[in-house]
Image (cartoon, coloured by chain):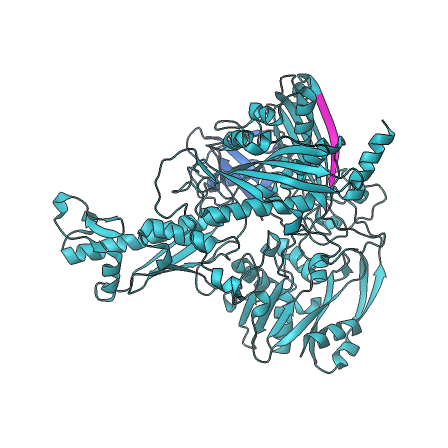
Chain colours: A cyan, B blue
């Protein structure tokens, strides 16, 4: 259901739920994903991966593999550019190891052969001579005194002297004086919390087809969240010019942040360039889990002070995130985000990025935020219970609103946190009686949302239908949302608009489909591209009528005289003007490009009820409600999809998912049988309540919704399990053995 | 003049100040003036920062104007997934 808070605009198309533009293709299996592209003469690739968590690469002998019939070429790091710097150097180091294998599964060589089977067989014939080095995979061990130092050269200048050499970044923000704040508190609570590394769990593995010709031109088809970024990074890693590499994004079976970077694409290009043949490279699930994606594991220490009436007087948090063997863990994110929902006078938050011998962490919806909120929202909930205050009331008492200076710095403009809390409190879920062994949890979440570089074009056809061209892969239904916004502006039916995701050669630069930005930023560009076309349509009508273009306006899909003084002319429809366009001045197109700011922040409140089996420790989610401020839901089905998807991924993160490393530093659970993501039968229907507090930075009030929904569930589920068991859940995942041990320990200690 | 609020860990690069006052009409000028005044901030600024002006976050664009009396917050570059 939608709760309109401020009904300032009436819409004809926006807010409706038409059929998705890619629906038929996807339900009939016709949609082309990353592995669905073929070329004649195509070779198949396979990657040789390190079996060691940390090892020097002394030599690589490819002679036996090269001798296998069907093998066409083999590449190592020597085939890549040598002048790569900065973030791209770290990406290259992850794509193909140089002198050191940094984690189990790190790529060290790749093969192209006439069949995938031959390529895989040949991979086993590559002889790599390793010298194993000491390794560390656990975040606590990584900053212990005797931990091996992984890459001291990656330490950023913001880390002061005296810190452990595996800490590569230190970020601190806050306001006031926490000593004063804690001095004013009646109750102070401090705890440590731990979360394990998890994978984004997209169903579609990474897949691509690359073709580089001897003249230096290249073409790449791949599953990605941003093909312009793929073009830029791959060109740098291969020493090519960006414009000579055309990249086409396939349909995408999930990315959740991890497909904002590259893994196999540069390898396929290098193989193709050396073999002078097209090369297809498709990861299997084990490779996906071992060598792509994972979100950081974390260790957070959070302390909160409160008055007896529930007023938060001070908050302190230290958030340690490991980013694998790379300096990339987003530790500044939990530092900024965790207490951002609250109006707190004294707060201090520190983020520390830590290196381990694990894969390079990749973004996972609101990167870094869920782990920190797992800590902060549990402390808040526990203190509410201790003070005998309703958990939602306590959050309402401290909630940030317009004019509040956030603990991360900025003063909020119009935001909708209070509206989400009030809707959650009024929801029937919150008053449903609980039974024995059941518990209820609440948590809130904040996310910045983004704008980002965007280009959009639209072209009018002679029959009056519209081709809208965007450059952001459609992951969550953006084609439908863009068509709805274009329909609203042009005042033509949704069905008359077809949206295409263009390749890098057909449209100007677009940032990734990431950061909850597409409906906001691409929507904004769509609106302006349509407005540019409307301006031209009005000019054509003015020509027909022999009046000045300024004397014509666009109304309900027609050009009409702007007033009585303009003259008395029959309105001209878009179809009428389109039919004549080639003789009245030529084709009519609209284009808009910008890097907009003004993406309004998002807030969400989650409610969850869990039942815990006291004999097995198994937790079952029996009721779940997501309340989210979407600003304005363009296509509510897709907003609800984001809300439900975030909740479900959070439930998996909370209850089952984890990277399990052996003492040898190797990952133990590399397939979905052992890495347990939630399936439909594990879950109740996730109820969604869309709040609409319009974002003043968007013509229709849109706020991003792609990330906020994954922030609260870890804490919400932990609060529910804690309530059901009477044992505070400080460590994820809350797997049955772990929860059962907590119950048994509590029983044995009375 | 613009009062730029730094995040806490930047203070050691800016003579322990939490607010640095510079002459600037937009983000580009503000960042340049900040680095001129405190050169130790250069690697941080060139590494990428975001700027909030009166609560509106400019993730990477440097063209936004800074109105007189605006609240200006320097932030670590905002990234999403």
Measuring from the top left, give residue A642's x and y in whole percent: 54, 47
In the rendered image, residue A148, in percent from the top left (x then y), is placed at: 82, 48
Q: Is residue A239 above or below residue A336?
A: below
Q: Decide whether the magenta segment is chiefly helix, strand or loop.
A: strand
- Judge whether residue A177 is colored magenta: no
The answer to which of A398 and A623 lies nearer the viewer is A623
Q: Is residue A233 above or below residue A338?
A: below
Residue A128 place in picture, x, y as percent: 81, 68
Q: Which residues are magenta?
A: A188-196
Vertical placement of residue A626 versus A419, above or below: below
> Image point 55% across, 68% down: which residue?
A220
Q: Nearer the viewer, residue A240 or A591?
A: A591
Residue sitting at 85 percent across and 26 percent down?
A: A750
In the foreground, A98 or A174: A174
- Residue at 72 percent across and 61 percent down: it is A286
Please name the residue shown 13% across and 44% down the image: A564
Q: Position of residue A105 (x, y in %)?
A: 75, 60
Residue, far bottom:
A69
Q: Is residue A469 left or right of residue A449?
A: left
Q: Give yes or no for residue A195 being in the magenta stretch.
A: yes
Task: Tell me where residue A588 sits by quadrant.
Answer: bottom left
């Amino acid at each position: 259901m939608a709760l309109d808070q401020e009904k300032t605009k009436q819409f004809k198309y926006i807010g409706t739920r038409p059929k998705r533009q890619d629906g038929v293709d996807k339900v009939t299996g016709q949609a082309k994903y990353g592995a669905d592209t073929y070329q004649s003469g195509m070779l198949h690739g396979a990657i040789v991966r390190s079996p060691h968590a940390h090892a020097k690469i002394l030599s690589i002998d490819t002679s036996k593999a090269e001798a296998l019939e069907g093998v066409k070429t083999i590449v190592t790091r020597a085939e890549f550019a040598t002048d790569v710097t900065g973030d791209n150097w770290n990406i290259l180091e992850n794509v193909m190891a140089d002198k050191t294998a940094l984690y189990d599964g790190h790529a060290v060589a790749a093969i192209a052969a006439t069949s995938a089977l031959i390529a895989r067989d040949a991979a086993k014939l590559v002889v790599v001579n390793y010298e194993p080095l000491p390794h560390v995979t656990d975040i606590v061990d990584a900053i212990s005194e005797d931990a091996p130092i992984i890459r001291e050269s990656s330490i950023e200048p913001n880390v002061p002297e005296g810190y452990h050499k595996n800490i590569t970044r230190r970020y601190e923000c806050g306001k006031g004086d926490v000593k004063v704040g804690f001095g004013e508190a009646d109750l102070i609570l401090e705890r440590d919390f731990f979360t394990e590394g998890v994978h984004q769990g997209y169903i579609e593995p990474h897949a691509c087809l690359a073709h580089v010709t001897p003249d230096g031109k290249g073409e790449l088809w791949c599953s990605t969240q941003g093909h312009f970024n793929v073009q830029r990074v791959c060109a740098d890693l291969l020493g090519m010019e960006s414009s000579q590499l055309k990249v086409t994004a396939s349909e995408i079976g999930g990315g959740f942040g991890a497909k904002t970077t590259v893994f196999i694409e540069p390898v396929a290009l290098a193989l193709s360039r050396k073999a002078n043949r097209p090369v297809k490279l498709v990861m299997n699930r084990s490779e996906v889990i071992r060598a792509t994606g994972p979100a950081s594991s974390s260790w957070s220490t959070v302390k909160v002070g409160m008055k007896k009436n529930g007023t938060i007087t001070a908050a302190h948090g230290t958030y340690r995130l490991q980013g694998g063997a790379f300096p990339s863990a987003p530790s500044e994110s939990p530092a900024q985000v965790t207490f951002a929902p609250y109006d707190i006078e004294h707060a201090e938050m520190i983020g520390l990025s830590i290196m381990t011998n694990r894969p390079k962490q990749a973004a996972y919806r609101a990167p870094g935020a869920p782990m920190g909120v797992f800590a902060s929202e549990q402390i808040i909930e526990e203190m509410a219970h201790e003070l005998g205050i309703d958990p939602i009331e306590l959050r309402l008492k401290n909630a940030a609103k317009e004019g509040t200076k956030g603990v991360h710095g900025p003063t909020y403009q119009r935001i909708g946190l209070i509206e989400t809390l009030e809707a959650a409190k009024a929801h029937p879920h919150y008053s449903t009686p609980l039974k024995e062994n059941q518990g209820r949890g609440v948590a809130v979440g904040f996310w910045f949302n983004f704008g980002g570089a965007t280009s959009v074009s639209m072209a009018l056809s002679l029959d009056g239908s519209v081709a809208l061209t965007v450059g952001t892969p459609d992951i969550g239904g953006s084609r439908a949302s863009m068509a709805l916004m274009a329909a609203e502006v042009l005042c033509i039916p949704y069905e008359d608009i077809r949206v295409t995701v263009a390749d890098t050669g057909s449209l100007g630069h677009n940032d990734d489909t990431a950061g909850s930005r597409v409906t906001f930023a691409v929507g904004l560009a769509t609106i302006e591209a349509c407005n540019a076309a409307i301006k031209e349509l009005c000019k054509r009508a003015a020509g027909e009528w022999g009046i000045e273009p300024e004397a014509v306006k666009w109304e309900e899909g027609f050009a009409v005289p702007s007033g009585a003084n303009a003259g008395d002319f029959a309105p001209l429809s878009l179809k009428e003007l389109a039919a004549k366009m080639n003789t009245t001045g030529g084709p009519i197109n609209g284009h808009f490009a910008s890097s907009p700011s003004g993406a309004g922040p998002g807030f969400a409140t989650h409610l969850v009820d869990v039942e815990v089996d006291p004999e097995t420790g198994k937790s079952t989610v029996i009721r779940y409600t997501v309340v989210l401020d979407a600003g304005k839901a363009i296509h509510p089905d897709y907003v609800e999809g984001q809300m439900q998807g975030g909740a479900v991924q959070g439930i998996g993160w909370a209850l089952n998912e984890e990277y399990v490393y052996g003492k040898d530093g190797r990952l133990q659970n590399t397939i979905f049988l052992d890495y347990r993501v939630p399936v439909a039968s594990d879950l109740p229907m996730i109820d969604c309540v869309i709040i609409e507090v319009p974002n003043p930075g968007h013509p229709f009030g849109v706020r991003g919704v792609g990330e906020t929904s994954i922030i609260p569930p870890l804490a919400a589920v932990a609060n529910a399990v804690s309530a059901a068991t009477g044992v505070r859940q400080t460590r994820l995942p809350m797997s049955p053995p772990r929860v059962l041990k907590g119950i048994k320990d509590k029983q044995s200690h009375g | 003049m613009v009062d730029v609020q730094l995040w806490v860990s930047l203070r050691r690069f800016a003579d322990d100040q939490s607010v640095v006052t510079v002459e600037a009409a937009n983000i580009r000028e503000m960042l340049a003036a900040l680095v001129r005044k405190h050169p130790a901030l250069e690697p941080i600024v060139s590494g990428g920062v975001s700027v909030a002006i009166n609560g509106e976050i400019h993730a990477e664009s440097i063209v936004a104007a800074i109105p007189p009396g605006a609240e200006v917050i320097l932030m670590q570059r905002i990234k999403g997934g």
